[in-house]
Image: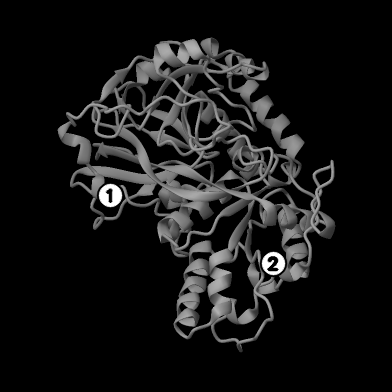
């Protein structure tokens, strides 16, 4: 019998509960007959480059315990190809009356081990492919921040890779509950500049999850003649400003000297040192005020679907703005917190639910401001909750800014002669996560969650541009744009 002891260990039971036979995974294999279908069949995706040497160690252990063919190294094969092949085989076997395939597809769970960028990649693929039924996803913390795993009760420390640790994790996956999570679509459009590039500039090479932000093709419905249009999506957060600049410096250093970044605690210490070096602790001395958010862009929000755009007043001292979907940022902090009753009534604010179609918008002045998160009820400057948010950059305010999506930063050039640069974030759809206890994330349907206000009727007078880009807001692009073709040189993109 499965049992959990005080240390968080959970017996996994027989390994056959998780095992998927070859013929399900490999269409050309011989069919087998099993007495009982596995109750928790899993497909495991591991980024062997994450967590120093831990990724490779996890792959070895999972393959020792399970069918080697159900454990995939993401540096060798992308998840969209794996899942497309698997689900095509499911359909073929089901049409032949294979009851085992039906049961495995119905009960399938996915495990992804890597940083937040890796987890976001898999979630984007699951969202794009619209798998039915959509398999819920458990995340193994194998990065520096590990905000996604932490949000759903899987911890934030890199795991052990021995067989007992992996068996314990499998037991937790079997007993985990399902929870829906909102996803968010992001579009950036700007006029073609008279000179200079405006493609995202990554830290030495394309970010691991730049599927989340890429230029649309000429045939895409979002493409407009004379403009550059980029699109993507995120699950945890989009941030812009000085925090993204520090993250960009960290990723650049790690790309230059990967041998120095093989320990999670060392990585976090290096991150703090870079914040100090780049002036995040004293930005008034090092950070041009022209790059403060209010001086850089006008911010508008739409509070409800079909509502009116309203200008959001940003305090002039705010140097970083975070659009937050999950209650975890920068390694486990909750910048939004839980507004008290008075603020909930006065400002129409709620607790941060992960499935309410609203995103929390928080501002920070500097790293010292961020230290308030160490206090029990500490939080950033709560700016708004919104169904959509739009950044309209001021003409010539700066030649670049820094942006970050789910832990992956880039430097974004801004045309000097253009005042029509727009970044818009809007609600996309939902996927299903696996939640372990205690779970930081809260559902709007959870009776134990803090009370939630009524939605109201909203504003029925939608602006003319409510449906703008509607056709394009359909997917992340994760399924077919994560990796560059082999013939494309990264240097040419930057």
Q: Hey, which quadrant is residue 99 in on the image?
A: bottom right
The reply, left or right, for residue 465 in relation to residue 78 is left
Q: Nearer the viewer, mark 2 or mark 1?
A: 2
Residue 190: percent from left, percent from top:
27, 37
Question: Would you place residue 300 above or below residue 27 in this image?
Answer: above
Q: Residue 197, can we see it?
A: no
- How many numbered callouts? 2
Q: Specify the quadrant that holds the C terminus.
A: top left
- Which residue is located at x 54 percent, y 66 percent? 106
Circles 2 and 1: CB atoms closer than 8 Å: no
Residue at 68% across / 25% down in the picture? 273
Which color scheme did the rendering employ for the protein? one colour
Q: Is residue 35 above or below residue 279?
A: below
Is 48 or 157 nearer to us in this picture?
157
| Mark 2 closeness class: few <14, some 14–19, many ≥20 residues within 10 Å | many
Residue behind mark 1 = 472
Residue 93 lies left or right of residue 190; in this view the side is right
Q: Which residue is pictured at 42% across the width and 44% down the height?
A: 233
Give SS at disc 1: helix
Q: Residue furthest left?
A: 464
Residue 332 appearing in the image: yes
Q: Earlier in the sequence, mark 2 or mark 1?
A: 2
Question: How far apart, in angstroms, are the residues tagged by discs 2 and 1?
Answer: 38 Å
Report x, y in % for residue 123: 51, 52
Depth check, front residue: 33 or 411: 33
Q: Position of residue 95 (x, y in %)?
A: 44, 82
Point out the residue furthest to the front here. Answer: 447
The residue closer to the viewer here, 376 or 97, is 97
Residue under circle 2?
18
């Amino acid at each position: 019998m499965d049992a959990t002891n005080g240390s968080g260990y959970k017996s996994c039971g027989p390994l056959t509960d998780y095992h998927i036979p070859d013929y399900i995974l490999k269409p050309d294999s011989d069919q087998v007959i099993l007495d009982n279908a596995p109750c928790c069949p899993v497909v495991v995706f591991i980024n062997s480059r994450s967590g120093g040497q831990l990724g490779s160690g996890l792959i070895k252990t999972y393959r020792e315990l399970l069918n080697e063919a159900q454990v995939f190294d993401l540096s060798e094969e992308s998840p969209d190809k794996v899942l497309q092949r698997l689900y095509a085989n499911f359909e073929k076997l089901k049409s032949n009356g294979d009851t085992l395939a039906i049961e495995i597809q119905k009960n399938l769970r996915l495990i992804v081990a890597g940083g937040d960028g890796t987890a976001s990649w898999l979630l984007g693929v699951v969202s794009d492919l619209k798998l039915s039924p959509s398999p819920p996803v458990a995340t193994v913390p194998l990065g520096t921040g590990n905000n996604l795993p932490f949000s759903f009760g899987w911890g934030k420390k890199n795991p052990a890779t021995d067989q007992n640790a992996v068996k314990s994790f499998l037991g937790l996956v079997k007993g985990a509950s399902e929870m829906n999570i909102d996803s968010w679509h992001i579009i950036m459009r700007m006029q073609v500049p008279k000179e200079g590039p405006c493609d995202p500039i990554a830290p030495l090479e394309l970010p691991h999850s730049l599927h989340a932000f890429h230029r649309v093709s000429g045939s895409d419905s979002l493409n407009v003649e004379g403009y550059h249009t980029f699109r993507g999506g995120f699950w945890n957060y989009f941030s812009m400003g000085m925090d993204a600049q520090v993250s960009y410096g960290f990723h650049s250093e790690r790309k230059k000297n990967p041998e120095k970044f093989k320990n999670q605690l060392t990585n976090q210490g290096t991150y703090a040192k870079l914040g100090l070096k780049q002036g995040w602790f004293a930005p008034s001395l090092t950070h041009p005020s022209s790059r403060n958010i209010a001086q850089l862009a006008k911010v508008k929000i739409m509070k409800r679907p079909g509502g009116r755009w309203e200008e959001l007043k940003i305090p002039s001292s705010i140097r970083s703005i975070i659009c937050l979907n999950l209650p975890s940022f920068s390694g486990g902090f909750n910048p939004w917190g839980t507004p008290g009753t008075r603020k909930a009534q006065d400002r129409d604010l709620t607790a941060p639910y992960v499935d309410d179609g609203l995103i929390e918008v928080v501002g920070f002045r500097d790293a010292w401001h961020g230290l308030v998160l160490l206090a029990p009820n500490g939080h950033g400057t709560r700016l708004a909750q919104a169904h959509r948010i739009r950044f309209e950059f001021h003409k010539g305010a700066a030649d670049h800014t820094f942006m970050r999506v789910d832990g992956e930063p880039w430097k974004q050039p801004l045309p000097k002669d253009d005042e029509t640069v727009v970044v818009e974030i809007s609600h996309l759809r939902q996927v299903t996560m696996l939640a372990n206890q205690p779970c930081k994330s809260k559902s709007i349907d959870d009776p134990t969650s803090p009370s939630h206000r009524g939605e109201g009727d909203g504003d029925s007078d939608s602006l003319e541009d409510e449906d703008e880009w509607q056709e394009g807001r359909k997917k992340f692009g994760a399924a077919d744009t994560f990796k560059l073709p082999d013939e494309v040189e990264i240097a040419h993109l930057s």
